[in-house]
Every structure is written in C-alpha cells, then in structure tokens.
Image: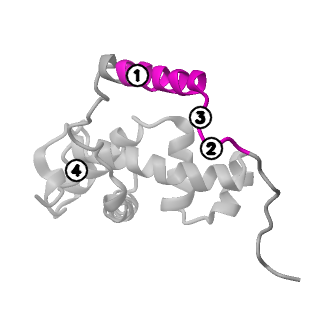
Amino acid sequence: MSAALSLPLVWARATPAPQLLSSAVHHIQRRQLQAAQAPPPHQEEDPAPTWAFYRKHTEKLLKRYLYASMQVGRSPSILGESVDRGWVSSRKVRTFEDALIFVLDVERCLNKLTIIDRQLITRVLIQEYTHSETAPLLGLSTRTVCNRVPQATDRLTEIFVASDLLDLPD
C-alpha cells in the first residue's frame, strides 16, 4: 500500500466558456467596488489596560490589610471619635490611627465590588482557600471560581489604584 494520495480522474475543458469568464470578472469587479465603498475598519488607538501584572501587588496589599485589621481589632470605639480618611494610606503604617485609616480605606474599596467578587477575594486571597474548596462554599463550579477570581482581583486592583492605595511604578 502506498501512502500517496490517489485522486479520481477529472474531465475539464481546456478553455473556459465565455459566459463563465464574464460572470467571474463581473463578480470580482463587484467585490472590488464593495471594498472601496466600505468604511475603513476601526483602528484602536491604545490597547485596553490590563491589571494582570499587578495582581501580586494587590494580594500583598490584602495581606497587609489582614495583618492591620488584626492589630486594630476592628473596634473603632477605642478612639472615642470617628476617624476620617487621611493621606496616610500611601505610606507605611506607623501608629494605631494610621492602621485604622488603612483598614477603613481598604474596606471602602472592597465594598465597591459586587458581593460575589468580595466573597471570592475573601475566600481565595485572604483566607487562602483553594479554588476547589471555595466552589462548594459559594455554590459555584470550580471552573467559575477559577475564571472569576482573576477578574475580581483585577477590578480590585483598579479600585486600589484609583483610590491611591496602590502606587504603581511609572
């Protein structure tokens, strides 16, 4: 047996029929006219920004948030008065008030996410559950969790950048 491809015998005309030739020329001319009249395809100026590179920075910021919230104890009544947001979030936490402001800022950013995104970030990034452990807890499939965690992290990164909690290198 040969591995060569065998083709059936094909009968064809040596010269094309004049009617087929004129039909083909007409078809080509019509296509060229349509292409000339069509508007140029939309050229995108800048690619859409992606936050995937900064996911690790967001995860580190969430770890810092977990540590600071444990130190603060989540009891603002200790201060005796309400604490407003200051500019301390962009520098290192040195005092109890700085830690409390940082915790409040991160919680405000987390509250801008949808409920399911918050639960995904809480379970996977903060509490360090695996995707397969998180799925039954939230009533989702493992595949859905795997797809939505990076998207939620990217949304949170964007919120952190917009609120000056996360400084990106220039």
| Residue beneath disc 2 | 14
- For this view, does 81 lie left or right of residue 27? left
Q: Is residue 62 visible?
A: yes
Q: Is residue 153 above or below residue 46?
A: below
| Residue beneath disc 3 | 16
Disc number at residue 80?
Answer: none
Answer whether labels 2 and 4 touch (C-beta < 8 Å).
Answer: no
Label 3 vs label 1: CA separation? 19 Å
Q: Earlier in the sequence, mark 1 or mark 4?
A: 1
Q: Earlier in the sequence, mark 2 or mark 4?
A: 2
Q: Quadrant of the N terminus?
A: bottom right
Label 2 vs label 1: CA separation? 24 Å
Query: Magenta span has 30?
Result: yes
Residue at image position (38%, 64%) is 63
Task: Indicate the amino acid at tag 4.
Answer: Leu
Answer whether labels 2 and 1 touch (C-beta < 8 Å).
Answer: no
Image: magenta residue range:
12-34
- Picture coordinates of residue 81, whole percent (x, y): 23, 37
Of circles 2 and 1, which is in front?
A: 2
- For this view, does 89 lie left or right of residue 38? left
Query: Considering the numbered disc 3 on the image, is that residue within a helix, a strand or a loop?
Result: loop
- For this view, does 5 lie left or right of residue 73? right
Label 1 vs label 4: CA separation? 60 Å
Of circles 3 and 1, which is in front?
A: 3
Answer whether labels 4 and 3 touch (C-beta < 8 Å).
Answer: no
- Picture coordinates of residue 72, whole percent (x, y): 34, 57
Coloring scheme of the render?
one colour
Residue at image position (34%, 19%) is 38
- Picture coordinates of residue 100, whole percent (x, y): 27, 51
The crowd level at tag 1 (other Cα within 10 Å; few <14, some 14-19, many 20+) is few
Q: Nearer the viewer, residue 100 or 22?
A: 22
Label 2 vs label 4: CA separation? 76 Å
